Amino acid sequence: MSKNDGKQKTPIVTHLVAGGAAGFMEACTCHPLDTIKVRMQLAKSVQKSASGKKLGFFGVGVRIVKNEGFLALYKGLGAVIAGIVPKMAIRFSSFEMYKGALADENGVNSRTSIFFSGLLAGTTEAVMVVSPMDLIKIRLQAQRNSMADPLDIPKYRNAPHAAYVIVKEEGFRALYKGVALTALRQATNQAANFTAYQELKKWGKKVQNIEGELPSYQTLVIGGISGAMGPLSNAPIDTIKTRIQKSNISGGSAWSRFTTVTTEIYKKEGFRAFYKGLTPRVLRVAPGQSVTFVVYEKVKGWLEVVQGKVKEGELTIAAPQK
């Protein structure tokens, strides 16, 4: 159970700013891991070095830097940053909205209501922001052009150009390829993420007899543990979604694309292929959620202090002089 503790409801703009700041820091910190994850998921066979040795997570990262330059690890970052503010704003604000709607008459939330609030928040962010942002990001990350060679011109120059080319060549609906799988992935991610975070946070406060917020280092650890829950539970969904979004084949129903890609992966690469990129995905998402929750809680706390002082008249904003 979790209570509102009589606290005044946090304004939506606070979730917007705090979530946006958290998302920006998370993207800049962890995006290279996401690029490596996508490359591993898109590989049709096991990637090997020149000596024939199997390449792991770090090996793939070194190969990308060697062949394409260090900045290649940040391909698609523009698409992520462009969508991170609305994504995080929608995630945290919709979670709070659903949590409020699912609370009992005393404003108390059960573990089940927290789970479904996360599930609905994940679905909401997937449909409104994540799906088109993800597709553009994956198309950019899949390009194997050298960032160090000015003559090696990629098909997609940046996020806006990629969006323009995709819509022009494949139609607007192409931006929503794999939207059902993206929604399923985000829903399960946030259901596991928020449930684990809320429960671990509540347990931490109870054990230490803390009334306010936990120390930042504890939030960092709890965020990392909760962030790992989603990838561990839905790795096959993410791999299939990535393959569908990378493809530029149009036409056919979403179900037919799903069955075609799933069957092709299983027949040509085996069952283990559905878990390609799981290690870098966990390494990407877990620290990413650590950063997200720490920055979110800090910024939200700062904004609430400022809002409280403004309301009590302790802090005034001077009007510009004419």
Image (spheres, rainbow, N blue to C red):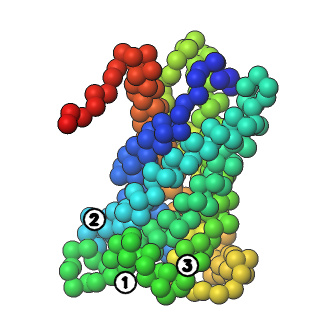
Contact check, label 1 and label 2, Cβ < 8 Å: no
* Residue of label 2: 71
Mark 1–mark 2 Cα distance, whole angstroms, equals: 17 Å
Mark sitting earlier along the chain (1/3): 1
Which residue is most to the right? 105
Q: Where is residue 112 in the image (x, y as percent from the top left)?
A: 76, 37
* Placement of 123 over or under 10, stated as above or below: below
Q: Quadrant of residue 179?
A: bottom right
At 52% from the left and 17% from the top, the residue drawn is 212
Q: Which of 318 and 310 is in front in this view?
A: 318
- Displayed quadrant of residue 276: bottom right
User: How far across and how far down the image is residue 165, in percent?
Assistant: 43, 82
Taking the spot 39% from the left edge, 16% from the top edge, the residue there is 313
Which residue is at a point 43% across and 46% down the rendered structure image? 20
- Quarter of the image that includes the C terminus: top left
Name which quarter of the figure residue 256 lies in.
bottom right
Instruction: Residue type at mark 3: give it.
Output: Phe
The residue that disc 1 covers is 155
Q: How far apart are marks 2 and 3 (CA)?
A: 29 Å
Disc 1 packing (10 Å; few <14; some 14–19; many ≥20): few
Rendered location of residue 205, percent (x, y): 58, 19
Label 2–label 3 contact, CB within 8 A? no
Question: In the rendered image, which quarter contains the N terminus?
Answer: top right
Q: Name the residue under label 3.
A: 172
Q: As displayed, is residue 82 above or below residue 286?
A: below
Q: Determine the secondary structure under disc 3.
A: helix
The percent position of residue 141, horizontal first and vertical second, equals 41, 70
1 and 3 marks in contact (CB < 8 Å): no
Q: What residue type is labelled 2?
A: Leu
Residue 171 - label = none
Horizontal relation, residue 60 to residue 135: left or right:
left
